[in-house]
Image: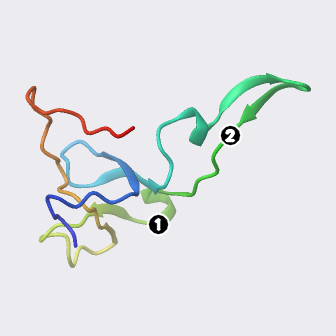
Amino acid sequence: PLHKKKNVPHIKSYYQLKPGGSDMEWFMMGSQNLSKAAWGEIINGKYGKCLRVLSWELGVFVAPSLVGGRLVPFTENSHGQEGATIIPLPYALNPERYSCNDEPWTID
């Protein structure tokens, strides 16, 4: 379900809003973490510089130019916008900022 406060999906999603905050410049969703293992790193290999990737992941990148219109995050007001591709997000569009009292969740 969309916009559930305690819903933490395994997918990772990244986006940039256009100035004004109603349309997206781009949107990306995938399984990769922000790590060298997932994105790779340049190393000096046997045959010179090469890209080493330790984990193969899948991601999808969407830009307005690729869908021929606007990218609009799903809200109660996003239906019926002509020429718009609606992007459903599993969280509120402008997530609540962390406070100084929040503690990160980690697991060993």
The residue depicted at 12 percent of the width and 44 percent of the height is 96
Q: Is residue 26 left or right of residue 47?
A: left
- Indicate the position of residue 83 as horizontal and vertical percent values: 34, 72
The residue depicted at 90 percent of the width and 25 percent of the height is 46
Q: CA distance from mark 2 to mark 1?
A: 29 Å
Figure quadrant of the C terminus: top left
Indicate the amino acid at tag 1: Val
With respect to residue 38, does 63 lie above or below?
below
With respect to residue 43, does 97 lie above or below?
below
Question: Which numbered disc, 2 or 1, marks the residue closer to the eye?
Answer: 2
Query: Between 39 and 102, which is closer to the camera in this rendering?
Result: 102
The residue depicted at 38 percent of the width and 57 percent of the height is 10
- Indicate the position of residue 69 as horizontal and vertical percent values: 39, 65
With respect to residue 94, does 1 lie above or below?
below
The residue depicted at 48 percent of the width and 56 percent of the height is 30
With respect to residue 43, does 62 lie above or below?
below
Secondary structure, mark 2, is loop
Secondary structure, mark 1, is helix
Figure quadrant of the N terminus: bottom left
Count the marks. Answer: 2
State the residue lying farthest toward the bottom. 80
Which circle marks residue 67 in the picture? 1
- Mark 2 closeness class: few <14, some 14–19, many ≥20 residues within 10 Å: some
Q: Is residue 96 left or right of residue 24?
A: left
Which circle marks residue 53 in the picture? 2
